[in-house]
Amino acid sequence: METEATVSEFQNMLSARGVSRRSFMKLCGAVAVAAGLSELAAPRVAQALEKSVIGATKGKLYPVIWIEGASCTGCTESFAQVETPDAASIVLDMISLNYSETLSAAAGWSMEEAKEQTIEAGNYILVYEGAVLEGWGGQALRVADKPGTEHLIEAAEKANAVVALGSCAVNGGWMGANPNSSGALGVQAFLKKAGIETPVVNVPGCPANPEWLVAVLADVIFLEQLPALNSENKPAGIFDQTIHDNCERRGHFENGEFVYKFGSEEEAKGYCLYPLGCRGPQTKSNCGVVLWNNRRSWCVQSGAPCIGCCEANPNDPGQNWVEVNTPFYKRHRDLRIGDWMVQPGTIALGITGILAAALVVHGFGMKLTGRMDGGADFEKVRGWDAKHPDKSIGKYDEADLKSDDKKEGR
């Protein structure tokens, strides 16, 4: 019958991969939220996915080159440690990961050849993880007998877009912290110096949340556009609100209910972690909305203060989250005076001690010079009252008035 319900080819493909329609719509909701949209946008995301390469009966997968700079591969691990079905699992079926030092099965010459062929063909996305090292003419990091900087330049020139994944890729991260002997900086700053104008999407975090990368890939691959970016080239829907804005403990902050010590009764009650160094009020990210580990939890929910790992200024390697936020469990960052690190509280205590000592020395000096013996002289009769006895405000003994008159020659 023409009116008989049928199962679409797309739904058959999802079923073949062990994905229910419900799970697929949940994925679409996750992508929408990660992109800074409401979950009500899930049907629109689903439609875009169904019309994209996921539902295509022919055509190639979207090529992706994933290059590791000076990194710990934490962002790769974050993206790879997923369940099935899951956002990343679906996306990995939509892209062709032609090159990845961590995930590729191939190694050595054959893998480098695959990268070169992908670059030559063009129309790909470059994901760069880790800091760019300019030290010693780029020799601080060598891959396949070439400086790491050359690999980035070659891959970025022909890419449709570059995703700087993780805070190290955004502005150097740990590698860019003092003394930064290897000359670490972020992808955007390096490409600008190299004169390469390929658009860069900065996705900070240590590591970056995998759903943030999914959201960026969904925009580029399915919607064929870059996500809306803020002034630091970060996806505005993800990084334009602070952790504090969406924190589940914000009510305790407003009520002045804080945790001052781990293991205390206040911690057990889930009070605000601000005194223990939480950087939520100054760190911009939607961690409290997207959550981690398939939306199970996130740092603050698990009882740890936010350490501000998404703070990364792409134009200044020195303003990275390590420099700005350490020590993590102190309320204030360390101040650097040359090679000397000190807490602002220590400086305040030192100045207070110096002032107190100066006052004590001054007191002893006054005593030794006799300037304190008998105290200071005071007027027995106010000068104004003595000159205007008819308008006198004070009340004085007659003897004091006569003594004052004699003293003044009246």
Image (cartoon, helix red, strand yellow):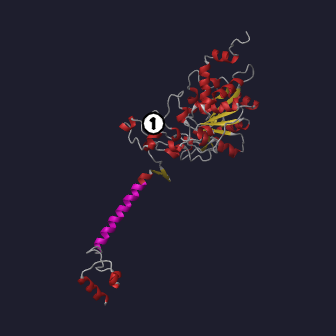
Q: Tag 1's secondary structure?
A: loop
User: Is 125 drawn above or below residue 257 in the view shown?
Assistant: above
**Residue 279, horizontal then vertical, whole percent:** 49, 43
Q: Residue at x 38, y 58 (%)?
A: 352
Q: Nearer the viewer, residue 297 or 4?
A: 4
Mark 1 lies on residue: 304
Locate the N terminus by quadrant: top right
Q: Main secondary structure of the magenta part?
A: helix
Q: Nearer the viewer, residue 352 or 259?
A: 259
Q: Is residue 358 magenta?
A: yes
The stretch of residues the image draws in magenta is 347-369
**Residue 34, horizontal then vertical, whole percent:** 60, 33
Q: Residue furthest right?
A: 121
**Residue 273, horizontal then vertical, whole percent:** 44, 40
**As drawn, is 192 to the left or to the right of 355?**
right
Q: Nearer the viewer, residue 240 or 86?
A: 240
User: Is 395 drawn above or below residue 211 in the view shown?
Assistant: below
Locate the C terminus by quadrant: bottom left
Q: Residue furthest front?
A: 390
